[in-house]
Amino acid sequence: MKQKIISYLKSIESDLFNISKYFYDNPETSFNEYKSCKYLIDILKKNNFNVQENYYNIPTSFYAEFGKGYPKICFFCEYDAPSEIGHVSGHNLVSSISLGAALSLSKVIDNFSGTIIVMGTPGESLSGSKVTLAKQGAFKDIDVGLMVHPDEVTCQSGSSMAILPLKIKFRGKETLSYENTDVFSSLNGLLYTFNSINLLKQSINENFHIDKLVINSGTDPYISSNTTEAKFYIRSKSISTAIYVEKRIRKIVDNANSLLNLDSEICFFELPYRELITNKRLSRLFCHNLKEAGIIDICNEKNTVSGLSLGTVSHYIPCIHPYISILDKNSSVNYFTKEFADETLTKHAQQNALKASQALSLTALDLIQNDMLLKEVKKEFFNKIE
């Protein structure tokens, strides 16, 4: 069975390259990935997958499945380009890797009970759709979630930061003027808030960060704005810490309202991300298969400071998010650059992507063939979630 998967992957190598090349040539921003979505759907339909388009009313999302029964193994596709300079995150390769794994596994799945799922998840760079799908119940009947992300170095699946994207708006109750010097402005409320947050950081044992700060308080230095708005991310190692910080910030804002005679609004301006919980048993299985595919040099777990929408999914089902190097050993190219996007089309990148597809497919096959493996994966998952 495994040799059949490997042989089939080699036979569609050019087709998988065409996916990454098409996405590279046609970069689309978050939730506008209409061409990319259609391209993947057409391939899946051609290979006899049953496809639901506009999945959970997200126009550029889809759900495709092949096979029947359990376990149900899900491969994730991402295909948005986060900037005008193209696929600097390598999402064009994320999709080709996942599709390669799903298509190759579909050639042997008829011999077993099991269902292959390919889920198109747009908007990873802006309120990733996986969070919405999770909250809507899209994963309640799925056993495992798998994906691989291109990077500078090949690493085991690790963790990601929990993120709460908070927006605070202060509004003054009285008209500001040069004569009325006793009135506090909305900007005073924001300054009070951030000075208090600095003190808060000293009183909390677990680390958290406030970053990506954007402030809007008018554009004319001679006119005091009656409204001031700030957007920022609360980042922490766990969602529980982030929520605790958020609650404390809300109290700080309430104090600012009382002291400075202001009104305020607080809300999320994007969807929150939970931290990634890597399933260690699943990760070891994938790393074994990656070594079997020819990639021996695998670094320790990568704990990224970024937020991942898969982090939220990992609280619903067992997941892994390993990283695959697409760069030559002596390359000086950095992730999230135009040069990194260009590297996704090199021969070396395509070869490693193919090996990643093989490792994903064989990992899924191991779970389908060996019920004890799946039980170990699920036991670890439920122990961590509890």
Image (cartoon, rainbow, N blue to C red):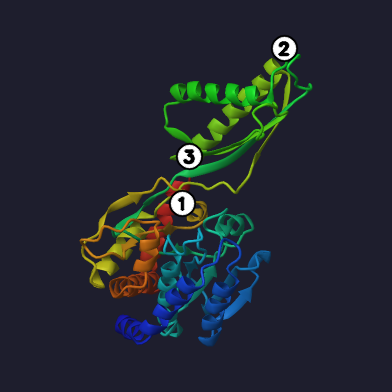
Residue at (57, 46) in percent of width and height:
272
Q: Quadrant for residue 3, please give it.
A: bottom left
Q: Position of residue 364 (x, y in %)?
A: 39, 71
Dot 2: few (<14), some (14–19), or many (≥20) neighbours within 10 Å?
few
Q: Which residue is mark 1?
A: 382
Q: Which residue is mark 2?
A: 182
Element class at badge 3:
strand
Q: Nearer the viewer, mark 2 or mark 1?
A: 2
Q: Which residue is mark 3?
A: 235
232 displayed left or right of 99: right
Residue at (54, 32) in percent of width and height:
244
Q: Position of residue 343 (x, y in %)?
A: 34, 67
Q: Is residue 149 visible?
A: no
Q: Amino acid at mark 1?
A: Phe
Query: How far apart, in angstroms, are the residues tagged by discs 2 and 1?
Result: 57 Å
Dot 1: few (<14), some (14–19), or many (≥20) neighbours within 10 Å?
few
Counting residues from the start of the chain, the first of labels 2 and 3 encountered is 2
Q: Amino acid at mark 3?
A: Arg
Query: How far apart, in angstroms, are the residues tagged by discs 2 and 3?
Result: 36 Å
Element class at badge 1:
helix
Q: Position of residue 140 (x, y in %)?
A: 57, 61
Q: Amino acid at mark 2?
A: Asp
Q: 184 and 254: which one is in front?
A: 184
Q: 287 and 20: which one is in front?
A: 20
